[in-house]
Amino acid sequence: MLNRLKELQIEAINEISNTTDLKELNDLRVKYLGKKGPIQEVMKNMKDMQPEERKSAGAVSNEVKNAISAAIETKKEELEALAIQQKLANETIDVTLPGRTVNIGVTHPLQAVTNELESLFISMGYTVEEGPEVEWDHYNFELLNLPKGHPARDMQDSFYITEESLLRTHTSPVQARVLEAAKGKGPIKIICPGKVYRRDDDDATHSHQFTQIEGLVVDTDVTMADLKGTLLELARQMFGQDREIRLRPSFFPFTEPSVEVDVTCSKCGGCGCNICKGTGWIEILGAGMVHPNVLEMSGFDSKVYQGFAFGIGAERIAMLKYGIEDIRNFYTNDLRFINQFK
Ligand code: PHE
């Protein structure tokens, strides 16, 4: 009987050492050490033994069971370690493989112009304001010295929504809003970029939606020389440090005096070419000293405060700066156009 137990031990250990998977190993545990296993079977004969014999048989059977258990444990650890090794090998990542290309967008030229002007004006102490695109007639016209029926309203053909609201025709209503919010107290130094809308037939130089950047400065000692200096700085920033500007008299109901501002042509430097139509000058924006009526209507004392304002057409600046010939390119979202600004 003792021999049979020893045989079983050798047989079991042999089988265990030949296993290559954990499931099989577990089956072997059940097979040899389970209640219906061969060792239990042999031990059934114990009841017929002499006490002495029974004692040594018990001891041997325990030794055999322990040896088999130990072999199983060792094998188990071995197989588990192997499984981890294999898993790691399968999941290896080749960090030298080339990556997938990610398409990175480009800044739209209008946004680029806006960004550039924002940083210029922020560096001069301005803050950036915003206003609604659906605006009250009150701010878009009335508070800008354009009462109902004023002939100059025809300069800006409008998309009305109701009798009293419309898509703003310019960013100037933000002037009125900022003045009103300041409750008669300066100083004010703001710019406001944004979309504006006018009823126009779209062609190479007209678009029913376009972009303006408004500027407004109000304080107790502001002169036209300040306006001119600011605009010169603007022109040089956008078109080059050797540019000059000139102011031509013009008319806007909300500024007095009003001017139109030209910059020396950056293509020919002022000698005359096809871009400046032979004049050497290119018009870039409208501006002027804030009309006393505008100040008064928004609660400012026009004897104490003066100001200047300007309205830049962002498309115009971008077209000149980048040589874009058709304003519709800004709005048709053709990637071949936009990707040129990488
Ligand atoms: N709002 C004017 C326009 O759209 C431009 C402008 C702004 C003129 C500020 C003077 C002062 O034509």
Image (cartoon, rainbow, N blue to C red):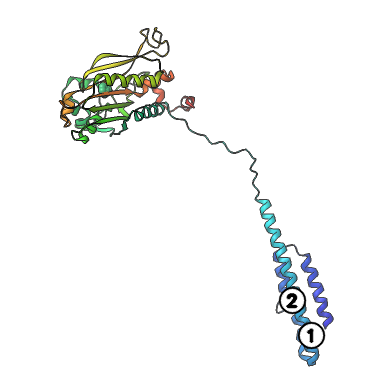
The percent coordinates of residue 91 (x first, y second) are 65, 50
Q: Quadrant of residue 116?
A: top left
Quadrant of the image where one finds ligand 1: top left
* Residue 193 or residue 34, whichever sits in front: 193
Q: Is residue 38 above or below residue 320?
A: below
The percent coordinates of residue 88 (x first, y second) are 66, 53
Q: Quadrant of residue 9?
A: bottom right
Q: Are marks 2 and 1 in contact (CB under 8 Å)?
A: no
- Tell me which residue sits at (77%, 79%) in the image: 63
| Whether residue 218 is visible | yes
Quadrant (top left, top right, bottom left, bottom right) of the N terminus: bottom right
**Disc marking residue 57:** 1
**Callout 1 amino acid:** Ala
Whether residue 235 sits left or right of residue 78 in the image: it is left
* Residue 324 or residue 287, whichever sits in front: 287
Q: Say which residue label 2 marks.
A: 66
| Whether residue 326 is visible | no
**Disc marking residue 245:** none
The percent coordinates of residue 239 (x first, y second) are 40, 18
